[in-house]
Image (spheres, rainbow, N blue to C red):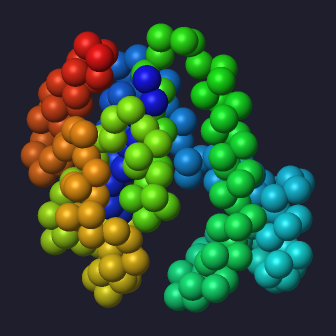
């Protein structure tokens, strides 16, 4: 079974991903794959440097992710250029990882921008992790050291809560304790397992 997992920034999607993995799901993390395909020495990194210049490299030769983010975050054309390099490489890795999963596995694709990229319809089920915007902002300021302005800007760049909720087969509200979250994720996993 192919399951999409998504949620707004600081909604708790990574925690849900970890819980699903603990319950026995095969989790494929888009962010991790996106980092892997532009790691030092990869054709992906070479393509990024060709498109954006060598100033995006750290002194050690790695991609300077914060610098890259600052360039593409507010420039639609540059973001699309970066996505045009990274996305095909990520999808290639996805396909290989999915093909290697056991036939009866619940394969969870952890994709932060699932809604924005129009991929929801390609899954048997979609889990959406949701939290109110003010809680997301509180978490980003507290846990990531961001300014409230930066937090609001990141939220505004993503799909709305309503857009994400509209594609949800299973909605996981993350407003309570970690134990509340674990209980809800277990319920969702059992529902997926039951088919």
Instruction: Give the residue displayed 69% in from the left and 72% down from the top.
Output: 82
- The part of the image, by quadrant, that contains residue 106 is top left
Q: Is residue 91 visible?
A: yes
Q: In which quadrant will I find the N terminus?
A: top left
Instruction: Give the residue displayed 54% in from the left and 36% down from the top.
Output: 28
Q: How many marks?
A: 0
**Residue 83 image position (x, y, % from top left):** 65, 67
- Which residue is more in the foreground, 56 or 94? 94
Image side of residue 58 versus residue 10, left or right: right
Q: Is residue 114 above or below residue 104?
A: below
Instruction: Give the residue displayed 33% in from the left and 41% down from the top.
Output: 126
**Residue 172 image position (x, y, % from top left):** 19, 43
Q: Is residue 113 above or below residue 4?
A: below
- Which residue is more in the foreground, 127 or 12? 127
Image side of residue 35 versus residue 138, left or right: right
**Residue 171 image position (x, y, % from top left):** 19, 43
- Which residue is more in the foreground, 105 or 35? 105
Image side of residue 52 versus residue 147, left or right: right
Q: Is residue 9 above or below residue 155?
A: above
Q: Is residue 135 visible?
A: no
- Which residue is more in the foreground, 35 or 88? 88
Instruction: Give the residue displayed 86% in from the left and 53% down from the top.
Output: 42
Image side of residue 190 versus residue 115, left or right: left
Q: In which quadrant will I find the C terminus?
A: top left
């Amino acid at each position: 079974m192919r399951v999409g997992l998504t949620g707004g920034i600081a909604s708790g999607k990574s925690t849900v991903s970890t819980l699903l993995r603990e319950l026995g799901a095969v989790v494929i993390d888009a962010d991790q794959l996106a980092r892997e395909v532009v790691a030092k020495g990869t054709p992906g990194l070479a393509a990024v440097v060709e498109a954006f210049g060598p100033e995006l490299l750290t002194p050690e030769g790695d991609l300077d992710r914060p610098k890259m983010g600052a360039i593409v975050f507010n420039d639609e054309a540059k973001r699309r250029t970066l996505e045009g390099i990274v996305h095909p490489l990520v999808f290639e890795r996805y396909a290989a990882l999915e093909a290697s999963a056991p036939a009866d596995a619940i394969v969870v694709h952890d994709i932060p921008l699932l809604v924005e990229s129009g991929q929801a319809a390609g899954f048997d089920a979609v889990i959406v992790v949701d939290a109110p915007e003010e809680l997301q902002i509180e978490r980003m300021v507290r846990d990531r050291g961001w300014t409230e302005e930066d937090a609001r800007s990141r939220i505004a760049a993503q799909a709305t809560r309503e857009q994400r909720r509209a594609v949800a087969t299973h909605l996981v509200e993350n407003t309570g304790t970690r134990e509340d979250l674990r209980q809800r994720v277990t319920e969702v996993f059992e529902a997926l397992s039951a088919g």
